[in-house]
Image (cartoon, grey):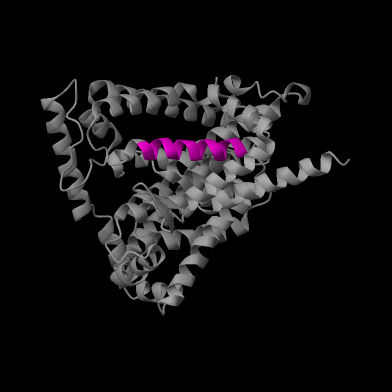
Amino acid sequence: MSAARPDGVRMRLIGWALVLALAGLPLTWIPLASLGGFDLTLPYALSIALGAALLLRVLRAMLAASALIPAVTLWLVPYLAYLFVLKLHLAGLPDNGMILRQLFFLTCGGTIATAILLCGGEARLLRRGGFAALAGFVVVAEIHARQLGMSWLDAVTRFLSGDLNFVIYKFLRPIFQSASGDPGEVPASLKNAVSGGMLIALVLFRAGHESAARDSRGWVVTLITLVILVLLNTRSVLLIAALVLPGAAIIATLRRPSHSANRLVVKLLIGALALALGAMMLLNGSAATDLIESRFTFEDASTGGRFAQFSFALAGIERHVIAGSGLHEINGLLVHNLFLGAWLHGGLLAFLLVLLSYCAMIGIWGRFVARIVTQRGYWLLPVRAEWVAMLPVLAFFRVWIAGDAGHPGYPEWISIAGFFALVLANAQARRPVARRASYPVAREAFA
């Protein structure tokens, strides 16, 4: 008994460290230190703290991490090879730190995946971590806003009156600046990272609902999160959220033993009706809805800038098809596309490696979705499989338009790591207890 008690305490500490690491998802705007030009932000520090907590159970953590290796080899090896090729092409040239960031984010993702696997994919940890991330962002932002003489109520009120500029430039920007102590321009990438972290936190929160009953609290939190995403004014994340929510609903319907085609059609029609009503509101609209409509016409400077980047990249690729052109920027920015950026900066081999990694990941994800829909009894974890399936969707789409040459950011890597860890944890749950201790199930989980 005396030996079991310290072990339980250590596992609880790891569980709470995992919750805190997940809670930091949308807090990338809070820097703690600068190390050689690399900003150590709060979520990065929390991931490092989680890694330190894993040392409490270092042998089991090493087993869990080793189980992840064959599960991710198919897509991770080509991606690491791509980073190596890119490093060779940029040898002696500035790389804007993008290779170091990718390796660091991979390490953070691996740490969180190891903790999830070590805890057996425990649903309540995902629920707590997701809620802590969403509530934490609101609370921390409110604290900084109060120091500036404002509050979320001011932001919502001004937005409903049509003053989106106040929300962006007089509310969110000063809050981000207050946290960083930097009065300069707040980059769009920061807002994208915050929005992406909020969406992944929402998916984790919804995935952690254990009861078979309807997740009423989850829908309330979902609506509040969507309002915050609108206020953050990040179009790409909102569009991805518009895919994630109905995607999870469709998969959940298909997984029910009593589901019928008629019920699914009814749900799709209700969704289409809701979209139509939303469109009518935009057409008739208020000042706030007019602002939302203008953001989704795709005729703004951001869209035009991306088309200019793509044309620039294609021209550079045409000049140096095989070897690539090295690191090139247009108007001080890297190309916002992983595939074009890889080819432009690293040549044809870099592009093919990225394409192989992406296609492998899509194939694994598609096979997983097919399994949870068609194989009854495949999913055993008390975690909502339909929301697990939505975890990597942000990464799948963001690499086509994201800054930093399209490389996945911190939230995207956490979402990928969480997906693979939960699928592997489910595979372990499917095996007899006596054969589960050595984590031998990685290959069959994704075969």
Quarter of the figure with residue 29? bottom left
Residue 177 location, quadrant: bottom left
Q: Is residue 138 above or below residue 61?
A: below
Q: Which residues are magenta?
A: 100-115
Q: Nearer the viewer, residue 272 or 172?
A: 172
Q: Position of residue 103 (x, y in %)?
A: 41, 35
Q: Nearer the viewer, residue 217 or 443?
A: 443
What is the x, y in percent for residue 231?
A: 38, 64
Visible residue check, residue 136: yes
Q: How many marks?
A: 0
Front one among 433 and 158 = 433
**Residue 210 visible in this rendered orientation of the protein:** no
Q: Is residue 160 above or below residue 304?
A: below
Q: Residue at x 52, y 35 (%)?
A: 110
Q: Of residues 264 and 17, which is closer to you in this image?
A: 17
Q: Is residue 198 above or below residue 262?
A: below
Q: Residue furthest bottom?
A: 149
Q: Residue at x 49, y 42 (%)?
A: 414
